Structures are given as structure tokens and as C-alpha cells.
């Protein structure tokens, strides 16, 4: 219910049944970035959490930790695999979502309301997808995957 109320306020774009709010940027690895008061919130897209199926463990960075471009920021384990989150720019961790230590699966219930970490960093917008580009990218990705598995 929380995600429904949240998305009513925002304008969203769709990639099939998956929502992409217009108030953030996206990476091709199913990550969203939302500027907020001089910092950047990092989270997992609705599509990304759908593919993850259930986050059972998460390794969050330490507050104050500096992470270089391309280095692992966060690792999380699902019932299917272990995934890593990297960023295309240097960042410093300002805050972590403490609720995730007790229940990492809350990301699956509210992917745009729950965030993983708050960072400060200087990004280059060319390394990010705006909502239109993200929706187009993910539409093509989903269509390709559905076509690939249609014959099985």
C-alpha cells in the first residue's frame, strides 16, 4: 500500500508492468539514484527487486567509507544469487538504511520508498539514464528475455 500512495504523487514511466518514477536517475544494473538535499539516495528498481525474488542478506558499507568508481558499494544475497552494486563515480557513504540489518527483504515490498544508502558524490549525467532512457532500455531488455523464454 505504501508504494501505491507514493507512486500516486509521482509521475512514472512504465517498462511493461514495472514502474520507473521520474524523480530519479537509473543505472543498467537495476539501481536508482535520487538527488536529495545535496546527497544521493541509492536503491534497487522495482524490476531489480522482482528479479532478486527475496533478499536474504545484505552487506552495507560503513558510514564515512569512501568507494571508488567501479568498486563494490553493496553486496546482497537472494535466494537465487549474490549481487553487487557498483557506481560509475566515486562516492562517500553518509548514511545507511539501518532497517535493512534486521529485514533486508523490505526492499522487495517498497523498492522506491526504501533506500539502501545515502551517499555524496559527483556524477556525470552521461553515465546515468534519465527515466525515459531507462524505461526504453528496460522495455527492450524485458522483451528480449520474454522472447528468449517463450519457446521453453
Image (cartoon, rainbow, N blue to C red):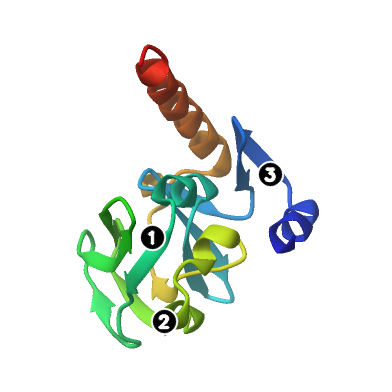
Q: Element at badge 2?
A: helix
Q: Quadrant of residue 86?
A: bottom left
Q: Position of residue 147 (x, y in %)?
A: 41, 16
Label whose residue precedes the other's in the sequence (2 or 3): 3
Would you name the residue on which mark 2 appears?
101
Quadrant of the frame with the N terminus:
bottom right
Q: Is residue 24 above or below residue 152?
A: below
x%, y% of residue 22? 64, 48
Rendered residue at 44%/22% (across/down): 146
Front-most of residues 98 and 54: 54
Against 66, residue 1 (above or below) is above
Marks 2,1: beta carbons within 8 A: no
Residue found 26% across the figure and 79% down from its top:
66
Would residue 111 be seen by someone viewing this image from the given angle? Answer: no
The 10 Å Cα crowd at callout 2, few under 14, some 14 to 19, many 20 or more, is: few
C-alpha distance separating marks 2 and 1: 28 Å
Q: Secondary structure at mark 1?
A: loop
Query: CB under 8 Å between callouts 2 and 3?
Result: no
Which is in the foreground here, disc 2 or disc 1?
2
Where is residue 131 shown, x and y percent of the image? 56, 42
Q: Nearer the viewer, mark 3 or mark 1?
A: 3
Residue 58: image x %, image y %? 34, 71
Asked which secondary structure carries label 3, the reply is strand
**Closer-to-camera residue (39/10):** 10
* Cβ–Cβ under 8 Å for marks 3 and 1: no
Observer-nearest of 36 and 135: 135
The quadrant where residue 56 appears? bottom left
Can you identify the residue that label 3 sits on? 12
The residue beneath circle 1 is 123
* Residue 36 in sight here: yes
Amino acid at each position: 500500500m505504501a508504494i501505491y500512495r507514493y507512486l500516486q504523487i509521482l509521475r512514472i514511466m512504465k517498462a511493461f508492468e514495472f514502474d520507473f518514477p521520474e524523480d530519479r536517475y537509473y543505472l543498467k544494473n537495476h539501481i536508482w539514484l535520487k538527488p536529495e538535499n545535496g546527497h544521493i539516495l541509492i536503491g534497487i528498481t522495482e524490476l531489480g527487486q522482482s528479479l532478486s525474488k527475496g533478499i536474504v542478506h545484505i552487506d552495507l558499507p560503513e558510514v564515512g567509507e569512501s568507494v571508488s568508481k567501479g568498486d563494490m558499494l553493496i553486496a546482497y544475497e537472494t535466494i537465487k544469487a549474490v549481487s553487487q552494486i557498483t557506481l560509475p563515480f566515486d562516492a562517500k557513504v553518509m548514511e545507511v538504511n539501518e532497517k535493512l540489518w534486521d529485514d533486508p527483504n523490505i526492499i522487495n515490498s517498497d523498492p522506491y520508498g526504501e533506500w539502501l544508502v545515502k551517499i555524496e558524490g559527483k556524477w556525470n549525467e552521461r553515465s546515468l539514464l534519465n527515466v525515459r532512457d531507462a524505461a526504453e532500455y528496460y522495455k527492450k531488455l524485458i522483451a528480449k528475455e520474454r522472447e528468449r523464454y517463450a519457446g521453453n
